[in-house]
């Protein structure tokens, strides 16, 4: 690891005399000679490598290019950013916006940290060349993942896989990921969703910049203090050389920057971050390419290439023409590049609501598209239930993975509501290297009784001034199933057609024994409800008792008051 840093630093430092002068000036005036690490437990000497994984980047390699010794006459500061200037001072628009947005966000939640966006810019320059010169889409996500080399202990730290390859595509070892080069285990703790798309994506410059800012502001750091700033940078990559490189860009950007279009930023000259030599012209982590092999050296004294010292053997020209026409070598038809996943969208899913114990009438339906916007078939989509619910897909499953059809659509299995009421969510996740998630709101409503009926058929009679021997018992149900906790209003009425409370005839008694002719009651388990005792006054006749549920279901019970037969 140290050898790798040293090689790259030497390469960067000897690029030009100006760069060497910048290092000298920095060492003399800008960076402390022996920065102190954070905390009493971190006693690693400055410049040495701490235990694997103790830094945000896992101490991955970084670009060692240094800024020009001056900004070319620019006078801008963080509050006065020039519109033009040297190419090295240009920061791609989306990348610059992400750094400033992160500074603003942290200023509102951790003002004491005093995070300057130029520090994020310096780290972004050193880690990824400002997202490979600003090669990001409209949402700030890199067009392809930015991955460091496998941290397999061969020239780098040894960090075994911590994310199952979810972020870095490597299920054996971790790799630093994204414009700010977080290792997956650090991203799992510090990852942010700064652009509000519902995902914490290390390859999104907005998410990564805010995560880096919060990481640098960890604890009681005040980054306006040189010592705290040094500790923060060392926590990102524990190397004094790294600190000096970041410090040089930090001071350079503070003297002036300007915005350039996305994709037009200056790429670092040092693009070798791999442990082995890539093939000529192949791409390497960081966005550059390795140079092709050197051409054959020219012969002394002139242009061209040196001739082969062995002359070719003499050949005799043919004396007769060929007897058959020359054959045309077979051609290989061009192959269609594989289509890759680009997005997932709602394909017409309606409201997801159901009554407890019943099936949902709607099913989640989504469509996947490729990077060109065309429907993508055979894409894997995982549907999952999220939240405190006992609702399940068919077969009692809470997670189901299906493939899209020829039109790019796929429909989740039918949902059946459980007994738990309330809201939950259904998610549809598509894509592997860059997954996208759709979230649907769903809810289960409690059963509401649609019927109320007596449990018995015995006639209800009483003598004048007496009480009814039979207690009235009813049951509230929904589609034949008893519904507990159903509110029921019991009222003695004058007439079934135009019901009004009757002021004579049968009555209930309140707690003080006074007659009342309206009661508010609640059904118990299974929807069963037994009414209190009913009393008769001295007036004979046939009376009516009306029972009404909260949903409007009604039952009319006949009560007869008559003198006993002689």
Image (tube, rainbow, N blue to C red):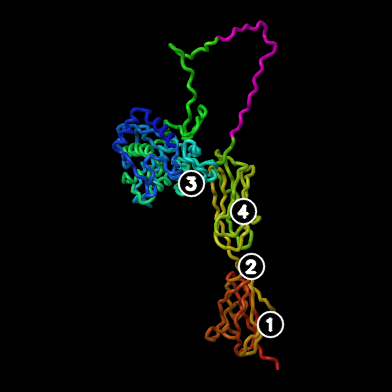
Kind of element beneath mark 2:
strand
Q: Residue at x 46, y 15 (%)?
A: 298
Magenta part mainly helix, strand or loop? loop
Distance of label 1 from label 4 (alpha carbons): 50 Å
Q: Mark 3, residues whose alpha carbon is within 10 Å: few (<14), some, or many (≥20)?
A: many
Which residue in the protein does label 3 denote? 185
Vertical order, 415 against 480 (above or below): above
Which residue in the protein does label 2 denote? 478
Which residue in the protein does label 4 denote? 363
Q: Quadrant of the C terminus?
A: bottom right
Residue 431 visible? The answer is yes
Of circles 1 and 4, which is in front? 4
Q: Mark 4, residues whose alpha carbon is within 10 Å: few (<14), some, or many (≥20)?
A: some
Distance of label 4 from label 2 (alpha carbons): 24 Å
Depth order, front residue of 55/103: 55
Distance of label 2 from label 3 (alpha carbons): 51 Å
Looking at the rendering, the stretch of residues picked out in magenta corresponds to: 311-337
Q: Are marks 1 and 4 in contact (CB under 8 Å)?
A: no
Residue 384 location, x and y as percent? 58, 52
Q: Residue at x 61, y 87 (%)?
A: 536
Per the rendering, the mark at residue 540 is none
Q: Quadrant of residue 60?
A: top left
């Amino acid at each position: 690891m140290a050898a790798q840093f040293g090689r790259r630093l030497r390469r960067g430092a000897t690029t030009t005399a100006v760069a060497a002068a910048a290092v000298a000036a920095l060492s003399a005036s800008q960076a402390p000679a022996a920065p102190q690490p954070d905390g009493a437990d971190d006693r690693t000497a400055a410049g040495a490598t701490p235990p694997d994984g103790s830094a945000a980047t896992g101490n991955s390699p970084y670009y060692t290019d240094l800024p020009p010794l001056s900004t070319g006459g620019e006078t801008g500061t963080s509050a006065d950013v020039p519109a033009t200037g040297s190419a090295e001072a240009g920061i791609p628009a989306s990348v610059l916006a992400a750094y400033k947005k992160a500074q603003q966000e942290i200023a509102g939640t951790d003002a004491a940290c005093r995070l300057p966006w130029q520090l994020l810019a310096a780290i972004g320059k050193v880690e990824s060349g400002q997202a490979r010169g600003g090669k990001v889409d409209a949402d700030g996500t890199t067009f392809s993942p930015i991955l460091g080399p496998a941290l397999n202990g061969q020239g780098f730290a040894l960090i075994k896989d911590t994310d199952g390859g979810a972020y870095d595509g490597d299920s054996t070892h971790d790799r630093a990921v994204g414009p700010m080069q977080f290792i997956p285990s650090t991203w799992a703790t510090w990852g942010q969703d700064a652009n509000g798309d519902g995902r914490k994506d290390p390859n999104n410059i907005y998410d990564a910049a805010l995560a880096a800012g919060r990481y640098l502001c960890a604890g009681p750091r005040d980054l306006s203090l040189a010592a705290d700033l040094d500790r923060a940078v060392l926590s990102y990559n524990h190397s004094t050389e790294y600190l000096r490189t970041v410090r040089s860009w930090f001071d350079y950007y503070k003297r002036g920057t300007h915005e350039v279009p996305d994709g037009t930023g200056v790429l670092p000259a040092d693009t070798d971050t791999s442990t082995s030599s890539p093939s000529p012209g192949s791409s390497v982590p960081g966005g550059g390419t390795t140079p092709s092999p050197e051409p054959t050296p020219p012969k002394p004294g002139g242009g061209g290439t040196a001739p082969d010292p062995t002359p070719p053997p003499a050949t005799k020209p043919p004396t007769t023409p060929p007897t058959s026409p020359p054959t045309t070598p077979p051609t290989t038809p061009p192959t269609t590049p594989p289509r890759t996943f680009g997005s997932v969208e709602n394909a017409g899913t309606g409201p997801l609501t159901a009554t407890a114990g019943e099936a949902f009438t709607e099913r989640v339906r989504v469509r996947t598209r490729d990077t060109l916007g065309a429907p993508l078939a055979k894409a894997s989509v995982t549907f999952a239930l999220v939240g405190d619910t006992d609702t399940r897909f068919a077969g009692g499953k809470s997670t189901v993975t299906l493939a899209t059809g020829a039109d790019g659509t796929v429909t989740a299995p039918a949902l059946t509501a459980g007994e738990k009421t309330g809201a939950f969510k259904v998610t549809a996740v598509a894509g592997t290297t860059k997954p996208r998630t759709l979230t649907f709101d769903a809810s289960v409503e409690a059963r509401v009784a649609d019927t109320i009926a007596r449990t018995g058929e015995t006639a209800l009679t009483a003598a004048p001034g007496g009480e009814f021997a039979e207690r009235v018992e009813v049951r509230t149900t929904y589609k034949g199933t008893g519904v507990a906790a159903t509110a029921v209003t019991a009222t003695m009425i004058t007439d079934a057609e135009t019901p009004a409370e009757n002021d004579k005839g049968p009555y209930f008694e309140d707690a003080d024994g006074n007659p009342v002719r309206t009661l508010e009651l609640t059904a118990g388990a299974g929807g069963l409800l037994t009414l209190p005792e009913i009393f008769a006054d001295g007036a004979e006749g046939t009376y009516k008792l009306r029972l009404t549920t909260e949903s409007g279901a009604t039952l009319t019970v006949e009560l007869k008051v008559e003198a006993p037969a002689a």
